[in-house]
Amino acid sequence: MKKIVLPPKLLHCFLFTVLLTAMACTPQTTSITSTHSTEEPMRERTLTVLAAASLTESFTELGKLFESQNPGVTVAFSFAGSQALAQQLGQGAEADVFASANNKYMEATVEAKRVNKDEVKTFVTNRLVVIFPKDNPAGLNELKDLAKAGLKLDLADPSVPVGQYTVSFLDKAIEAPEFEPHFKEDVLDNVVSYEDNVKAVVTKVSLGEADAGIVYVTDITADAADKVDKLDIPDALNTIATYPIAPISNSKNPDLARAFVALVLSPQGQGVMAKYDFIPVMGNPQ
């Protein structure tokens, strides 16, 4: 057979044509992960949490933890008195999660149809304590001293959960034999200011603007502990504050809302709450 020798330029064209034909006939097997991801692009989302002022430190830490577990998510907190937050929700404020310092204001959001009753869970409890400046200007040594004439007492307003618990403490005290029947009246006569959240009470006592105040034990944070001392309130007179949490029924981020609640109720979340002296629900939320 006679051997055909093609000129170089024609040989290149021939080989290129053969290569194109081979590629057209060969099935393509491109990896989906390398060129066409089936996953949606990560969305930047904000989870809005309305929480009682006494949760400021603990929830701030939980928020950072939640963000680390959910890339692209930012947790935005609004800390205030539970009564103010419940009112905002009742007026239609947008939010994803509500954490209250008592059941009363959570029930108000249920009645306003902002929260589904069956999704409300108790996640921690708390207790009251009396605080006073380190230099103890009023010479407080026992609870009876709260009735001393001239003492400047700062309390949370009775509309605030801690203010309601304070009134309950005083009601119990006047029934106890070690207190005078007019103890409650004398104590309330010493009030120089009522605050709309518990953090304001801590601030005024820390600054020496009041001789004493009644707050949650969890409000004696590391910073506050350098400025105040405390008088414990015995169990018989104390009121255990119950903290409920729930996702907002019309949340724009229902998956994130339920995930945040789950974190708070998880062993990891409960550990964070215990770190700030809250009493965990011990893995049995109600």
Image (spheres, rainbow, N blue to C red):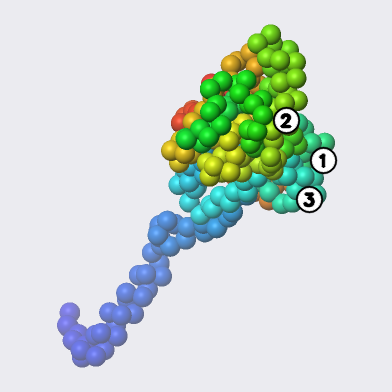
Do residues under tags 3 and 2 come within 8 Å of each other at their CB atoms?
Answer: no
**Residue positioned 56% across, 20% down in the render:** 142
N-terminal of the pair, mark 3 or mark 2, is 3
Q: Which mark is residue 112?
A: 1
- How far apart, in angstroms, are the residues tagged by discs 1 and 2? 33 Å
Three-letter amino acid code of the residue under disc 1: Ala
Residue 220 appears in the figure:
no
The residue sitting at 51% across, 33% down in the picture is 136
Residue beneath the point at 20% across and 89% down:
8
Residue appearing at x 63%, y 33% in the figure = 151
The residue that mark 2 highlights is 188
Residue 44 quadrant? bottom right
Specify the quadrant that holds the C terminus: top right
The answer to whether residue 286 is above or below residue 226 is above
Nearest the viewer among 255 and 261 is 261
Residue under pointer 3 = 92
